[in-house]
Image (cartoon, helix red, strand yellow):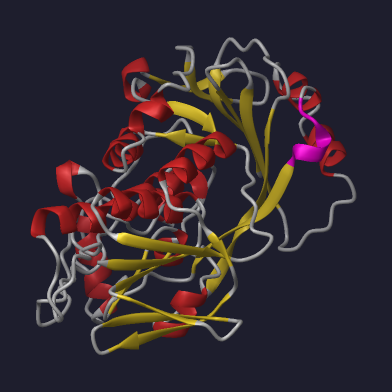
Amino acid sequence: MRVGIVGAGIGGLAAAAAFTRAGADVVAFDRPGAAPAGAGISLFSNGLRALDAAGVGEAVRALGAPPELPAGIRTPRGDWLTRTPPSSTADLRVVHRGDLHAILAAAAPAVRIETVAEIRTTADGAAVVLESGQRHDFDIVVGADGIGSRVRSTLFDDPGIRYAGYTAWRGVTSEPVQVAEVGETWGRGERFGVAPMADGRVYWFAVASAPPGWPVPDESVEVTKRFASWHPPIVELLRATDPRTILRNDILDLAHPLATFVKDRVVLIGDAAHAMTPNLGQGGNQALEDAVTPGRTRRRRGRPGRRASAVRLDSPRQDGADCPAVPARGPDRPGGQPGRRHAPERFDPGDAGPQRRPRSREDARLAAARAGQRPEMTGTGPSTRSR
């Protein structure tokens, strides 16, 4: 099987590694200037299992586990609002995105740095057309090109993206910093999160409600000013971070869920398929699940025929993991736990078409709303975490 992958971030590289491990001939493309950048990433058990399937799980675990510390949510003064049982994050790994990217890149074929101009479906596969005019034909094309996906906008009913109402700073301290507690601190319209890494450095994030495109002359000065009066060690973490490495992004997600992630022999994964706000800490983990599912299915089923495909991303995950879905909208929770989200439509290229598979009472209400029916009233209202 010949597989083309558009995008070489964490999801794209994981897909390249998984397909290569399954014996496929893989070519990955990434646009010029798309150098890996980022701060930390929280890897939960589902993401780690996906990395195992890609053949790099042990290399990632070798980066080390974060220290076991009291965790939960606090007020800006430091009072505890909730505490998180240590067992809920027993399998958690917090690593630098650059380190994860390097491990995945070593397990994947070399990436071709070229801009993809167009994706076309063909009678027995799909084609990637580059800006140079070169055309490459594949049995399957994987769209891993992020929230602004060209693959999605070209071949799918693209819902567009929306602003979540807040902006986020992220950073990793340049040196180890001693912390006694971890988790999040919630203020009015502002939040701060602390997630130590195994080497003593600390991944932190800060979010603030703000208009989209809010201009900030100096990110380090702004984030320090905003959180200067909050409990220790927040200011210490900010001062221990090289200002040049602090990132800020407006938080976006898809305006509404896609009906399917598959179009003929093209499949979307990660943010291209279901971009989500970071409040569940599951964006990267879900991208990793997406990335390894097609390759694992191919190993089970063998080479697909002309009409059948190894891609089954819209079906529920194997091994008990959740399928990609609509996330909650709210504060970033790298120390939180993955929650239930509504399942996308199940799709198998051998089926007559997609079928909705509700997985909860709220899923049924969502399905009824889409069908124009009055949702069934229950004793509990819709979860605020799914807004």
Query: Going 9% across and 77% down the picture, which residue do you hit?
Result: 351
58 over 64 or under it: above or below: below
220 over 27 or under it: above or below: above
Q: Is residue 227 visible?
A: yes
Q: Nearer the viewer, residue 221 or 294?
A: 294
Query: Going 73% across and 61% down the picture, which residue do you hit?
Result: 211
Which residue, as the protein is rendered here, is positioned at the far right? 217
Quarter location, residue 347: bottom left
Quarter location, residue 262: bottom left
142 over 187 or under it: above or below: below
In the rendered image, residue 73 lying in the magenta stretch gets the answer: no
Residue 335: x and y in percent read 46, 30
Residue 348: x and y in percent read 15, 71
Residue 65: x and y in percent read 44, 18
In the rendered image, residue 242 lying in the magenta stretch gets the answer: yes
Q: Nearer the viewer, residue 363 or 200?
A: 200
Q: Is residue 159 visible?
A: no
The segment highlighted magenta reads 241-246
Query: Going 72% across and 55% down the picture, which residue do you hit?
Result: 210
Which residue, as the protein is rendered here, is positioned at the far bottom? 123
Residue 182 vs residue 169: left or right?
Answer: left
Residue 154: x and y in percent read 46, 84
